[in-house]
Amino acid sequence: PLRRAWLAAARRPYSPPDTAPRDPEAEEDAAMAAFEEASGIKFRHFGLLRQAFTHPSVYHAVVAPGLGTGWHPSARVPLGHGAVAGGVDPRLHNQRLEWLGDALLNLAACDFALHYFPESHEEPVTLLRTALVNNAVLIGAAVRCGMHRCVRHKDALFEEEGSRTRGKMLADAFEAFLGALYLDRQPLGLGLAAVKAFTAATLFEEETDATVDERRWMDPKARLQHCLNEFSALTGARLSKTFELLEEFGPAHERMYVVGCYINGALVASARGLSITDAQMGAALRALESLHLAPEEPEEPEEGEV
């Protein structure tokens, strides 16, 4: 009975909120169809692909009675498909799929790292997994796949090369795509297999050897901790790092966080990011720079097909 219940759950189809078919006349749909052609992945439910590439900024603020102007969840309007009575289904943007894709990405990375280091203990496997799923790596993979041409947004900062907003949108879109791919293939029992195959081809096999050879498996926080441990072992002086949230500002859908990096209680560096984790990484990197311990920057990824 339990096995039947699991199989039934695995084959239960997901009903995407965006049920509109491909529109050959729509420029946005054409870009996504080109992505399908380049990647060789044809979605059974095109609405899932559209949802994965739709940033929440698509639902812009409007003037609503009694609310005034600004960001109001009940006052979002669409740019394209998905209009429903009384507004827009809030599930049409990619945050829900990003949440699912993040979990899938970490699972796929754990599986890959275990096979890459078949005889290692937990620490190197964990460091490799962390290095393979950080935002910088995801942004590079998204650009190589051509996802940047597919993102639907209403934020001018996305068009600025190298901007934090552009990077965050691309990393989110990559994770959301994994969530969409899983849901599209799961009724066939191939959801996880499709995610593992895609991440291996576009991310892990592309990044792992260079990450290990160039010691990129240490993100700034891990590298800073390693340096402090080495210093403590050589000198006997105990050094510890902590991070503290100093400030947060901006609208709820694009919150900015400022985090300080402290060593033995003294503020060494601070940085801001679109998430607390990104801000911590930035503060740790600046702390390494102030201590002249920062690694050389890797080359920018080149755009290309899957």
Image (cartoon, rainbow, N blue to C red):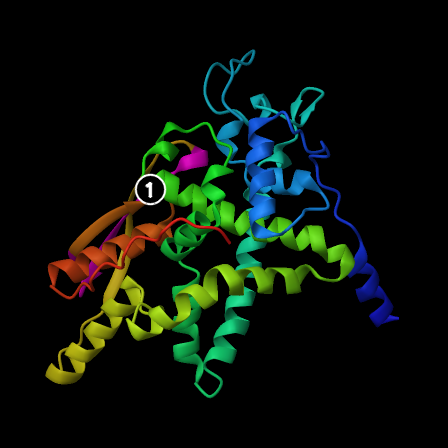
Q: Nearer the viewer, residue 241 or 234?
A: 234
Magenta highlight on residue 37? no
Q: What residue sits 65% from the left and 27% below the top? A: 81
Residue 279 in view of the camera = yes
Residue at image coords 31%, 50%: 279
Q: Quadrant of residue 239?
A: bottom left
Give the residue at x 16% y 55%.
267
1 relative to 72, above or below:
below
Q: Residue furthest bottom?
A: 119
- Quarter of the figure with the N terminus: bottom right
Is 253 included in the stretch rendered in magenta?
yes
Residue type at numbered disc 1 = Arg
- Give the quadrant of residue 108: bottom right
Q: Secondary structure at mark 1?
A: helix
Image location (x, y in percent) of residue 66:
54, 12
Q: Nearer the viewer, residue 236 or 289?
A: 289
Vertical side of 297 occupied by 88: above or below: above
Q: Main secondary structure of the magenta part?
A: strand
- Placement of 183 over or under 248, stated as above or below: below
Residue pointed to by mark 1: 164
User: Start and end of the magenta stretch?
Assistant: 252-267
Residue 146 in picture, x, y percent from top left: 47, 45
Say how many tags the image has: 1
Q: Residue furthest right?
A: 1
Q: Is residue 92 left or right of residue 246?
A: right
When the figure is inspected, residue 68 is found, relative to residue 108, above or below; the finding is above
Q: Residues within 10 Å of mark 1 (few under 14, many from 20)?
A: some
In the rendering, at what x and y percent does residue 153 appear? Answer: 48, 31
Residue 173 is situated, as x and y percent measured from the top left of the image, at 50, 45
